[in-house]
Amino acid sequence: MSRALPILTVLAGIVVIWYAAAVWMNSTWVYDQAERAGTTVSFAEMVPQTMTQDRPLLPPPHQVGAELWKGLFGQAVTSKRSLVYHGYVTFKGTMMGFALGIIVGVALAMSIVRFRVMDMSVMPWAIISQTIPIVALAPMIIVVSSQLGLTGRDVPKAIIAAYLSFFPVLVSMVKGLRSPDQMQLDLLRTYGASEAATFLKLRLPASMPYFFASLKVAIAASLVGTIVGELPTGAIEGLGARMLIGSQFGEPLIMWAALFAAAILAGLLIVTVGLLEGMARRRMGVPA
């Protein structure tokens, strides 16, 4: 309870600020309607009207919660209005991008640690690549994918997700693979261990804490990349598509519900990575 109390205190503060902001922003519509009708509304009359608008500027928490509940549990999971269905579409793209990002990140990290020329030539470009805004890069990836005959939306989304997720894996794995000190390397050399044996028995196990730490960042980045990739592809499925539809059709409740569904999905993915990390640590004999 002592650990949960600070979290609940911050959460309560956010909800209070959220309600206050909803009253302030949605009151404009209430006063405008009253002015058109030639009437006046008191503060006590105005507040309830800001809580029940169909298209509020800022939906209050209970409206977002109700829309989220309806999207998650009020529809069949196969319905195109179900957030579970759209979450699965985004989840599928996220996993494809996440896997591709891990492969690229680990492969580049191994090359950089092994070959100095890769360290000098590739690492600076990897850093520079992250300074390019993904919203500017995503349409280019889609155009190039289309030119290559990749007409589906899954591959471009996976590439965009991998673009964001490979970098934390790369940086952490380079750090982890270089973490063994010179005495440990010299000890294995005196045993006559080959370079492959040194990698498998020393460098790779030493990099595991760095690897799993990077996965928690990479999985969240991959989800963000997938959602961003759904925006310019004209997709009608996925949480990013729901956000775009809510924005284009003036349905803020749909947009906010999809946003919170994405946050829930991100939380579940990070927890899953944490569980896998615990299993791997126990398997390697490392205390949790």
Image: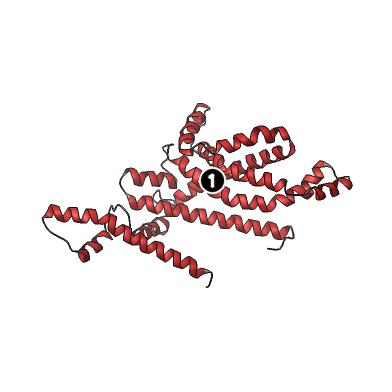
Q: Residue at x 53, y 46 (%)?
A: 221
Relative vertical location of residue 286 with respect to residue 197 in this rendering, above or below: below
Q: Position of residue 245 (x, y in %)?
A: 36, 44
Relative vertical location of residue 54 with respect to residue 10 in this rendering, above or below: above
Q: Position of residue 189 (x, y in %)?
A: 86, 45
Q: Residues within 10 Å of mark 1 (few under 14, many from 20)?
A: many
Q: How is the image coloured?
A: secondary structure
Relative vertical location of residue 135 with respect to residue 76 in this rendering, above or below: above
Residue 127, quarter of picture: top right
> Given the image, on which type of amino acid does mark 1 rest?
Ser
Q: Nearer the viewer, residue 83 or 110?
A: 110
Q: Relative to residue 81, is residue 119 drawn left or right?
A: right
Q: Position of residue 118 (x, y in %)?
A: 69, 34
**Residue carrying label 1:** 222
> Where does the C terminus fall, quadrant-wise?
bottom right
Q: Residue at x 66, y 38 (%)?
A: 108
Q: Relative to residue 251, is residue 167 drawn left or right?
A: right
